[in-house]
Amino acid sequence: DGGITQSPKYLFRKEGQNVTLSCEQNLNHDAMYWYRQDPGQGLRLIYYSQIVNDFQKGDIAEGYSVSREKKESFPLTVTSAQKNPTAFYLCASSPSQAEETQYFGPGTRLLVL
Amino acid sequence: DQQVKQNSPSLSVQEGRISILNCDYTNSMFDYFLWYKKYPAEGPTFLISISSIKDKNEDGRFTVFLNKSAKHLSLHIVPSQPGDSAVYFCAASGYGGATNKLIFGTGTLLAVQP
């Protein structure tokens, strides 16, 4: 069964703490993406990666960091510098950077304690 | 500056009738458009897409229409079913650069009444 998995489904962060959200895909896709969704808003791009060991900032990258050491994995770290981290985080992938259609994981809800 | 706009936050239709969801865009560089369906606390699911070289694309009960001169696209669902109740996002691509970044609208909540 091919797909994108995100874990955990819910994550709680204390003030000043860094947390890492996992995203794994077994679709053999080259490109991966992280989005953030807030209530009443569309999805906003945080970071994206076209190939292994390469990634680019999206529209709202401040306070976040990523790595792409393996093709199938694209973890997102929400750092203490992100002042409003409470949101629904979505990971997506596409076969290549030339492919417009992106396929999404189930999401992680991050809440601040 | 919202480049992709879905001006109707919500829409309610009767089961069996047509649902029409609308989307407007401002950037004439967009050349590919997609519709996603999203249930609460889940990731969006790809529904249907259309290239700017076409004005219509159909897949079963779903049809997307593109009017480039008006910078407008719409998603028609016929007949609507209760299971179609979800938030629908339109997205646009072709926004400059080498990577196909998707720009999303704010979504329309569709409620199909039995």
Image (cartoon, coloured by chain):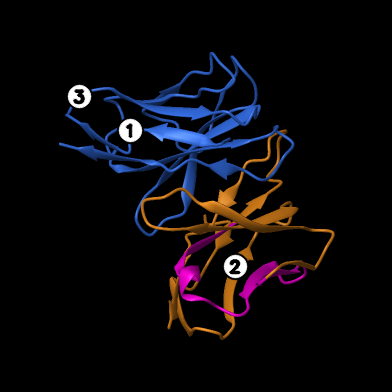
Chain colours: A blue, B orange
User: Mark 3: which amino acid?
Assistant: Gly
Few, some or many residues within 10 Å of mark 1 (<14, 14–19, 20+): some
The residue carrying mark 1 is A8
Using the image, determine if residue B56 lies above or below residue B35: below
Q: Are marks 3 and 2 on the same chain?
A: no
| Image location (x, y in percent) of residue B110 | 46, 72
Q: Residue furthest front?
A: A1
User: Mark 1: which amino acid?
Assistant: Pro
Element carrying mark 1? loop
Chain letter of mark 2 equals B
Highlighted range, magenta? B61-90
Mark 1 or mark 3: which comes first in sequence? 1
The residue carrying mark 2 is B23
Q: Are marks 1 and 2 on the same chain?
A: no
Chain letter of mark 1 equals A
| Residues under numbered marks 1 and 3 in contact, where contact means CB atoms less than 8 Å apart | no
Element carrying mark 2? strand
Indicate which disc residue B95 carries: none
| Residues under numbered marks 1 and 2 in contact, where contact means CB atoms less than 8 Å apart | no
B81 or A44, which lies in front? B81
The residue carrying mark 3 is A16
